[in-house]
Image (cartoon, rainbow, N blue to C red):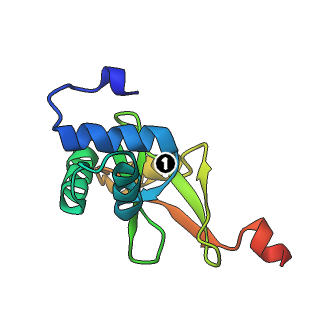
Amino acid sequence: MLQGVDMRLTKGCKKVLEVLEQVQELSSAQDIHGLMRNEDDKAPGLTTVYRSLESLVSAGLVQAVALGDGERRYELVKPGEHHHHLVCDKCRSSVHLDQCLIEELEEGIKNKYGFQIKGHILEIFGTCKVCTAK
C-alpha cells in the first residue's frame, strides 16, 4: 500500500501508515502510539500521532470510525474507498462489511430530492455471535 503513497508525507504520517498496514484492523491513536513506542524509543509522541491521523484522514488514506465509546478508531483505505462495520455493543469487536449498503439509497435520494451527497458513514451496532451465545 505504501508504495503508491505520495512521498511528501511527514515522517509521522509515514510511521502511522506503516503501523496501520501491519495491524490491518481498527486501531485507536493510543494503540498506534503504543505499537510505535514498542518498536522504537524515539517514536513520535501521541500528539504527533493524532495530528498525523487527521492529515491521513483528510488525504483519504485512512478512515476514522466511531464505535460508540467516544474514541475513534482508524484503518487504512485505498483513496476513494470507505468501509462500514458491524459493532458489538458488549465486546466492542467489529466486522468489516465487504460491500457498501448505502450506494443505492444515495442514488434514490439524489434522484428524488436533488441532494448532492458528498459521503456517508454507516456503523451498525448490535451483539455479535460470541456474545449472543454467552
User: Residue 128 occupies which quadrant of the picture?
Assistant: bottom right
Which residue corresponds to the image point at 60% horizontal and 49% vertical from the top-left? Answer: 97
Question: Which residue in the rendered view is the most extreme toward the right?
Answer: 133
The image quadrant where one finds the C terminus is bottom right
Q: Relative to the observer, which residue lies in front, 9 or 128?
A: 9
Q: Relative to the observer, which residue lies in front, 20 or 113?
A: 20
- Image coordinates for residue 7, horizontal then vertical, percent: 19, 25
The image quadrant where one finds the N terminus is top left
* Observer able to see residue 59: no
* Observer able to see residue 34: yes
Q: Residues within 10 Å of mark 1 (few under 14, many from 20)?
A: some
Please give the residue where the numbered disc 1 appears in the rendered image: 83
Which residue corresponds to the image point at 59% horizontal and 51% vertical from the top-left? Answer: 96
Q: Secondary structure at mark 1?
A: loop
Tell me if 97 is positioned left or right of 18 in this view.
right
Residue 79, relative to residue 6: is it above or below?
below
- Image coordinates for residue 17, horizontal then vertical, percent: 34, 40
Residue 32, relative to residue 23: is it above or below?
below
Which residue corresponds to the image point at 58% horizontal and 43% vertical from the top-left? Answer: 99
Which residue corresponds to the image point at 40% horizontal and 43% vertical from the top-left? Answer: 19
- Image coordinates for residue 98, horizontal then vertical, percent: 61, 43
Residue 112, relative to residue 62: is it above or below?
below
* Type of amino acid at the residue the image marks with label 1: His
Q: Relative to the observer, which residue lies in front, 126 or 44?
A: 44
Number of marks drawn: 1
Tell me if 88 is positioned left or right of 75 in this view.
right
- Image coordinates for residue 48, horizontal then vertical, percent: 19, 55
Q: Relative to the observer, which residue lies in front, 75 or 86?
A: 75
